[in-house]
Amino acid sequence: MNRIVLLGTKGGPGIRARGAMPTSTLLELDGRRIVIDCGIGVTKGLVEAGVDLRDLDLICITHLHSDHLLELGPLIHTAWCTGLRGAVTVYGPEGIATYWAGFLASMAYDCAIRVLDEGRTPLAELVTVVTYAEGVVLEGPLRISALAVPHPPLENCFALRFDGSHTVTLSGDTAYFPPLAAFAAGSDVLVHEAMLPEGIDLIVQKTGLGEALRAHLHAAHTTVDDAARVASAAGVGRLVLNHLIPVDDPRFTAADWLSRCAALWNGPVTLGHDGLEIAL
């Protein structure tokens, strides 16, 4: 079965009761199981999507903000404790190896005890961490490509394109970036982050972070209007709005998001929510 499952669709690291979880996505394509980003909640989201954690395969991290990275180590460790059947490869930007080494150090006592007491293969022996940059990340029947995108102040942030029997592109976190259209050209699905301009003031008020947060949102993220522009220029089969800012705010409905798309994109569009499955 080829599918995309949005495991977490919230932009930003905060979580609230009965609200959406931070960013993580499952892509199942041609027999490969790919987890893209590991915000908090990814492990439970995978299980609820019907994934057997023992079959964890391939993980891609788009950048090192916590809402995309926080549960990477715990996901792998939990899969290991569940009875991980094979090796796991993690692709991430510069700094990913430092994260993984730090996680292993933080869990050294537990890992050693489980190897000694339960006879497990050492976790470090089952995980390969690969640092990638712009260009081809993985070559083969599944081809993964990366495009550097602007998400200040971070320097290493990437959109990812997955080519197999279908093509899926994920924008990662990015300001409006017209070159992304060429990168995503012809994709069956473009999963793009989206920010509703009407919600920015409310987010600033809710968090109490003031003008610094407002400046960051405008400089580092893409409005829903501009996500629609990218989809139109790329000629994709479907646009899926993800990493939503704001999310779960009752003052805004799907109509607020979709009406902005309609003026700029005449193809199919889906407003993401946690657990949404898209068949390929």
Image: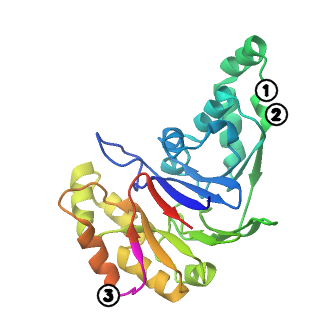
- Image quarter in which the C terminus is found: bottom right
Q: Amino acid at mark 3?
A: Ala
Residue 268: say if magenta. yes
Seen in the image, is 132 located left or right of residue 250? right
At horizontal 36% and vertical 74% (from top left) the residue drawn is: 224
Per the image, the residue denoted by label 1 is 122
Above or below, 120 relative to 226 = above
Farthest residue toward the left? 251
Per the image, the residue denoted by label 2 is 125
The answer to whether the residue labelled 2 contacts the one labelled 3, judged by CB atoms less than 8 Å apart, is no
Farthest residue toward the front? 1
Give coordinates of residue 62: x percent, y percent: 60, 58
Quarter where residue 273 is shown: bottom left
The answer to whether the residue labelled 2 contacts the one labelled 1, judged by CB atoms less than 8 Å apart, is yes
Give coordinates of residue 172: x percent, y percent: 54, 64
Above or below, 34 relative to 220 = above
Query: Which mark sits nearer the N-terminus, 2 or 3?
Result: 2
- Label 2 element class: helix
Per the image, the residue denoted by label 3 is 263
Seen in the image, is 52 located left or right of residue 123? left
Measure the C-alpha gap from mark 1 to mark 3.
54 Å
Farthest residue toward the top? 117
Seen in the image, is 2 located left or right of residue 266? right
Quarter where residue 212 is shown: bottom left
The answer to whether the residue labelled 1 contacts the one labelled 3, judged by CB atoms less than 8 Å apart, is no
At horizontal 28% and vertical 39% (from top left) the residue drawn is: 17
Q: Which residues are magenta?
A: 263-269
Query: Which mark sits nearer the N-terminus, 1 or 3?
Result: 1
Quarter where residue 179 is shown: bottom right
